[in-house]
Structures are given as structure tokens and as C-alpha cells.
Amino acid sequence: MSVLDAKTGPPDPDFRLLFESAPGLLLALDPDLTIVAVSEAYLSATRTRREDILGRGIFEVFPDNPEDPSATGVANLRESLHRALALKRPDTMAVQKYDIQLPPAEGGGFERRYWSPMNTPVLAPTGEVRYVLHRVEDVTEFMRLKEAHRAQGDLAEELRDHASQVEAEVFQRAQEIQEANRKLRDLQAHLEARVEARTAELQAANEALRHSEEQLRQTQKMEAVGQLAGGIAHDFNNLLTVIFGASEVLEMHLDGNANLAAIRQASERAAGLTRQLLTFSRRQILAPESLDLNASLTGLHPILQRLLGENIEIQAFCSPDLRKVFADPSQIEQVILNLAINARDAMPEGGSLILETANIDLDEAYAREHPGVTPGSFVMLAVSDTGHGMDKETQGRIFEPFFTTKERGKGTGLGLATVFGIVKQSGGHIWLYSEPGVGTTFKIYFPEIQREHQSHAGPELPAAADEGGSETILLVEDEDQVRSVTGTILRQAGYTVLEARNGAEAEALCAQCMDEIHLLLTDVIMPGMNGRQVSERVTSAHPNLAVLFMSGYTDDAILRHGVLEANVPFLQKPFTPAKLRMKVREALLRAAPKG
């Protein structure tokens, strides 16, 4: 046979390499349940090495946890595998608790894990089972979240809904994998004929991947800038707290001093800037409620007319039957005003400002094109202008704090950064469309209000007067200057103050103090014990103790992930001496016995 008669075309694919590189958690077993192949993802998830498990029985490699007498992982998996072998069809298992043995380098023992397994027989042309494909999904984090929230009665319904959704998704993925495996067997016979088509599909996928990576890089950059801004604002708020307190102490001795008045005014302006940084980094406290965006636009219309001037025409198109959203009304008004000011500056010679609202349902396709978006029902607020527009480079930086295209001295560069932060903290998404010489449109999508937020209302607290008292206060603050100034202000108001730098010192003071301690005033984030842990230790010894938390920032990690809960007494840094005295009095009144 000549060289010309030789078979041409691509070489046969390396199916073992494809199997080992697959992103799923996969094992291939022979009929006697010996491991013959394993994916890299499976090795990573189970802390094992290929050379240690190939050729060994699955239950020899993955036994039950001997320290858990109720373990049923091995028994349940064995039954499922036998069913798949006997019936020659896939067997999908319910979520299983199946602990994984850790390698000696990680301390040995067993780690608690949960899995969603599926066992699929692979048949030879003659019909007998050649292999069993064991495919699992690691759902440990979901199960831990489910267990952690089970005790919280107010979240029980939400958790059940979430659990049902996740279980349905896991089952759906299992069915999709089963269908994908069936298609793979069918496609194997036609692989050579599909090479050209698959190549075109891969090129399209690579183009989509490049597009997604570009969007992801922009999202990560904004998140990193937000973290940096929030950290700077937190540290700066501690310094402003010292300046506020020290200046008031000086004012008591130098009444009417112009320099002290200038210090206070500059400090208040600096505090405003830090609030905008906290807004951008999504680390401010919001007061959300059920909100009608149509009503917000109607209420702002007179202000917008005065703000924009006569040479800019305002057009509003409000959709009837608009869904409600759950947001802070004052913050949403700030979003609209900031966007209107931005539009005005883009139309120095006049133009049109168009405000629109609409009910929008975002689907999976839209979510794939816009990272961070979850499909669902939203309310859209669009703000458009006929100004000079922006090029791509400007659009890529427009939400960064302190970035501005205005002349020096004509803007802080925090207006659109503030808009970005408010929208993100309200659970929404903002997208920008702009063409140089044509204009700009900002589209904001707020999620439709959920049932649990329909009648949201915070508790009404009596207003506390700015007055002193004679109670004893335990002050816990790791920043020396903040602790010193705060203690001075409270002592001047008549309180007895015990100062501690950390939780350990606070516990020691409680043990030594023979008198009653009435209030714990503690920073939230400190080395060692955080503020919540300090309050738990101290209140165990003083059950009637009032607690007031303070912090330079209050991001989601503080408010919603175990450090603080909503509606607890809280003092935002920087604070003035008057605000400190008022919050202390309010916390003491809240904790006072009702009679």
C-alpha cells in the first residue's frame, strides 16, 4: 500500500486524557467496583492521589467514618452501584453524608462532607456492563448553610425554598449529565464528521470567553477599589472621631475660637467624603422600605427642574402598574439626583433628560452576558441624556472613586461612585450605554420586592436627649486615641468610665469591678475577640447590661454574617461628642426596665 493510500485525518482523541481533565468529579469503576480512572477534579475534592487509588476498590479507598456510628455512606453507595449494574441504567442518589479521610499532611482523621452522586453503567456493544461512571456533586457548603440556619425561625421558610431550589438544580444537573453522556455515546460514532463543526463552535466559545473575561476583570477591579476605599474610610473615620472629640474639648476652654470652628467645618466635610466612600464600597447602613419608583420621580420633578435649568427639557415615561422595590428612599433620590447632575454637565448647551421606569424580566441569556446578574423580575430605572457621550476608555473608569472628566476643582469624582455603591448595596445592577456625540443612558435594575419585605418597618425608638448621667460604662476600643477621647467625653458628661483595649482586658475589668456596670460601649472589629464576642462574655456576668456597638464601617460581613444583627444599638464613626452622648443615653433607655 502506498503512502497515498494511508488513512488521513486527525489522530484518535485521547479519551483517558479527556476523562482526567473533565471539570466534573468523576470515577470510572469496573464491574467488581475497582477504580480504573479518575478525574483531576475528583482527586482535588477528595484529597487523594491517582497513584494511591487506581486499582483499588472504591470502598477500600473511601470507607465510612469509624467515629460516626450512624454513617450510611458506604451502604447506600453500594446499593446504588449494584442497582446500576443489575438494571443497566443510571441510578441517581439523594444527597449523602459521606466523610472523606484527610491525608496525614493535613492532620489525618475524617472531614464531614455531603455529596449528590449518580452512577451510570457504560455498556459494551454486546450489552454487558463494561464500566460504571460514578459522578458526584460536592454540596457540603450548601448543607452546612442549611444546618446553620435551621435554628433561625424567621429564616426557616426562605431556607426551605432555597433548599428545594438547590436540590432541584442538583437533580436537574444530574439529569443533564445523564443526557450529556447519552449524547456523547451517540457522537463517538460520528466524531470525525463533526470535527469541522466543533472547531467553529470552539472558536465562538473562545470569543464569548474573552468577552466574559473582560467583563469579569472590570468587576474584580471595581470590587478591589471598593475594598480599598472602604478600608481607607474606616481608618479615616477613627481619626475624625478623635478630631471631633478633641476639638469640642478645646472649645470648652476656647469658646468662639475661629480656628476651632474651621477645624470642625473641615472635619464635617471630610466625614461627608468618607460617607461617600462607604457608599461606593457598599459599607454604609441603609433604611430600606417598600418603594414606588414612579412616586420617587414625581416627587423629585420640581427639584430636577430647578437643578437642571430652563435649557434642559425633562421627559418622564412612568410605566403603569410598576412593581415595588425594597430600597432606601433617600438613597434612591440621591441616585437620581447624581445621575441628573452628571447629565446636566454633559449638556452645557442644553438638551433633553429622559427618565423611564418599566417592569423587566431578565432571563438566563442576559445574565450570562452580564456577570453578577441573577435572572428574575426587576424594576428598571433609566436615565438618558443627549449630551456629548463617553468613549470606551472613560466608560471603563466612570464608576471609580475620584475619577472625573471635569475640570480641576469642579467635582470630587464621587458622584457616580456613590450611585454605583447605592445600587449594588440595594441588590441592583447598573449598566452604561454611551456613544460620543450621541448621549448616555444609565439603566438600573432593582429586584422586585420580596414578600418578607412587603410590610417592612423598623421599631420606633424614643428620642434620647443629649445629656449625661451617673452610670458606669465599660469602654472597649483598640485604637488608643479614639478610646482616650471617647472616655474623656463620657467622663465630662458625668459617667464613670472603665477603659479596655480588647476583650481580655474587658473581662478582667468585669471580674475586678464590684459595682454594677450599666453599659458596654465596644468597637465591632478588634484583634482577638470582636465586639459581639465581647458583649456575650460581659453580659454573661452582667445580664442587665446595655450594649452599644460602634464602628468606622458596617459592611455586610459585620451586619449580616454573624458579628452584628440588624436593629442592634449602633454608633457610626466618626461621631461628634453630642452624638455619642445621645446614643449612650438611648442605649441606656432601651435597656431600662419597663414599669
Image: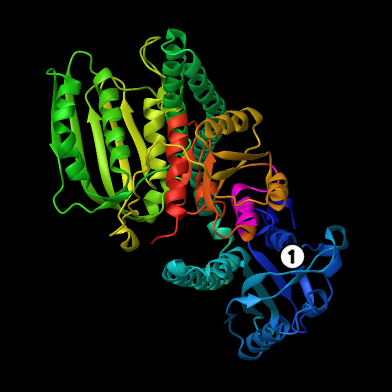
Q: Number of callouts in the render?
A: 1
Q: Quadrant of residue 130?
A: bottom right
Membership of 443 in magenta stretch:
no
- Judge by depth and name the residue closer to the eye, 580 or 270: 580
Frontmost residue, 410 versus 75? 410
Kind of element beneath mark 1? helix
Question: Magenta span has 531?
Answer: yes
Q: Position of residue 417 (x, y in %)?
A: 41, 30
Residue 67 vs 530, above or below: the answer is below
Residue at 41% across, 19% down:
412
Relative to residue 278, is residue 416 drawn left or right?
left
Which residue bears the numbered disc 1? Answer: 46
- Which region is colored magenta? 527-539
Image position of 134 (left or right of 595): right
- Name the residue rendered at 47%, 42% in the picture: 584
- Residue 417 in sight in this render: yes
Image: 128 above or below 478:
below
- The residue at the point 66 percent across, 65 percent down is 25
Question: Residue 297, image x and y in percent?
Answer: 19, 38
Q: Nearer the viewer, residue 115 or 434?
A: 115
Amino acid type, label 1: Thr
Quadrant in the picture for residue 403: top left
The front one of 4 and 101 is 101
Compared with residue 133, is residue 229 higher up or lower down, i.e. above or below?
Answer: above
Q: Residue at x 46, y 13 (%)?
A: 260
Asked if residue 467 lies left or right of residue 473, the reply is left
| Residue extending farthest bottom | 86
Q: Main secondary structure of the magenta part?
A: helix
State the quadrant of the N terminus. Answer: bottom right
Residue 44 pos. (x, y %)? 73, 59
How crowded pointer 1 is (Cα within 10 Å; few <14, some 14-19, many 20+) is rated as some
- Which quadrant holds residue 385? top left
